[in-house]
Image (spheres, rainbow, N blue to C red):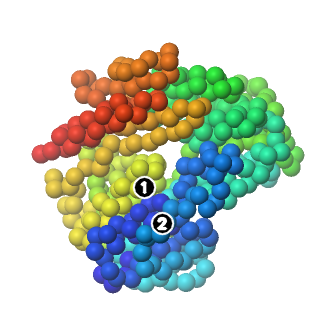
Amino acid sequence: MRTVAVVGASLAGLSAARALRDQGYDGRLVLIGDEPHRPYDRPPLSKEFLAGRMDEADLALETETDDLDATWILGTAAAALDPGERAVRLGDGRTVRTDAVVIATGAAARTLPGTERLSGVHTLRTLDDARALRADLAGAERLVVVGAGFIGAEIASTARALGLHVTLVEPAPAPLAAAIGAEMGAVVAGLQAGQGVEVLCGTGVREVTGTTRADGVILTDGRRVPADVVVVGIGARPNVAWLAGSGVEIADGVLCDATGATGVPGVVAVGDCAAWFDPAGGAHRRVEHWTGAARRPAVAVRALLAGASATSGSSGSDVRPPEPPYFWSDQCGVRIQFAGRTGPGDEITVEEGSLADRSFVAVYRRGDRPVAVLGIDLPRPFTRWRKRLAAEALQSAAP
């Protein structure tokens, strides 16, 4: 293996490049990124950067100790993968010859149809997105955020702290309901409302109004909410179209085994575009959170250097399962932490703290087995439960 190409130059791609060097790979290393920027940290974009408390230099992920000895190709996207020719073809016509590929092309923000012609409508996924939104908010008074997932809820909290009148619109019964359930999502709704955000759940957006610039939204229940700026935070789709015809299996992302190996030898996938097999759940799942992008590449690189593929049995009992998904969100003056996966019918008990104080640890159980834990402003007890979840996952995967 003389050349490895890492396609995607954000956190997952950088983590894979570091893992390659840490695990002894000393050949040619090429990092390909569609953005012109060197790797940067995305979580602050909706918080400190948007609020002006952090500048672009503070976002840099590379450190003085990084010595990757890599070739960087930035500002051009991958257009195709040809495993037979061992080549990655770029959008600008160039071809990168390679013996192995780490797919780390991430995901793109979903948009609302019909808003392409309107200024004042934003998504937030990239540094350029954050620059544009920050500039637009500086002259705005009213913001409507469509979607109360992590990004939407954080933007709402940040904008409210900046003094804007903020309306948060969510079709689900509560913010973050898909991740933490409606019961605990209602607690997050209370945090937002307590900060002064108008939270409208159980309704979606029928239309963004305006001639050349957005001036409001019409909800599915018929109400109209005026706005100077609209932010759309309705999830992301994996950037995998460039893999068409490559032989890499695609569903909701790149289908991988429990180590990140695809069915094509010499090709692994990491980060937001990768749907790893979850032995505990018996299904492929994408994990769109910072911790997964930082930690899982080391597992995938180990499989890559060992020559594993999803068809060679690398998902067997010798594979240590990845840790339960973990995320955190800073909003409304508190830190929300969550690990595991919740599902319909899970029993939720508050183990420490109290809902009334909005500082607690809640454990989700399926039968008598803990499957997830939520913490609000109690990091130490949360960490103990997170470790227990990881131990339970390892034990359940044992032969």
Q: Is 169 positioned to the left or the right of 14 in the image? A: right
Residue 51 occupies quadrant: top right
What is the residue that sits farthest to the left in this orientation? 399
- Front-most of residues 98 and 136: 136
Q: Is 103 positioned to the left or the right of 78 in the image? A: left
Looking at the rendered structure, the secondary structure element under dot 1 is helix
**x%, y% of residue 67?**
42, 75
Looking at the image, which residue is at 48% across and 66% down?
A: 63
Label annotation for residue 63: 2
Q: Is 67 positioned to the left or the right of 391 in the image? A: right
Looking at the rendered structure, the secondary structure element under dot 2 is loop
Q: Amino acid at mark 2?
A: Thr
Q: CA distance from mark 1 to mark 2?
A: 17 Å
Label 1: how many Cα within 10 Å (few below 14, some 14–19, many 20+): many
Label annotation for residue 293: 1
Looking at the image, which residue is at 71% across and 56% down?
A: 131
**x%, y% of residue 398?**
15, 44
Q: Amino acid at mark 1?
A: Ala
Asked if residue 110 can be seen in this view, the reply is no
Residue 193 occupies quadrant: top right
Q: Is 387 positioned to the left or the right of 356 in the image? A: left
**x%, y% of residue 294?**
41, 56
What is the residue that sits farthest to the front in this orientation? 64
Cβ–Cβ below 8 Å for labels 1 and 2? Answer: no
Looking at the image, which residue is at 35% across and 53% down?
A: 276
Q: Is residue 261 above or below residue 229?
A: below
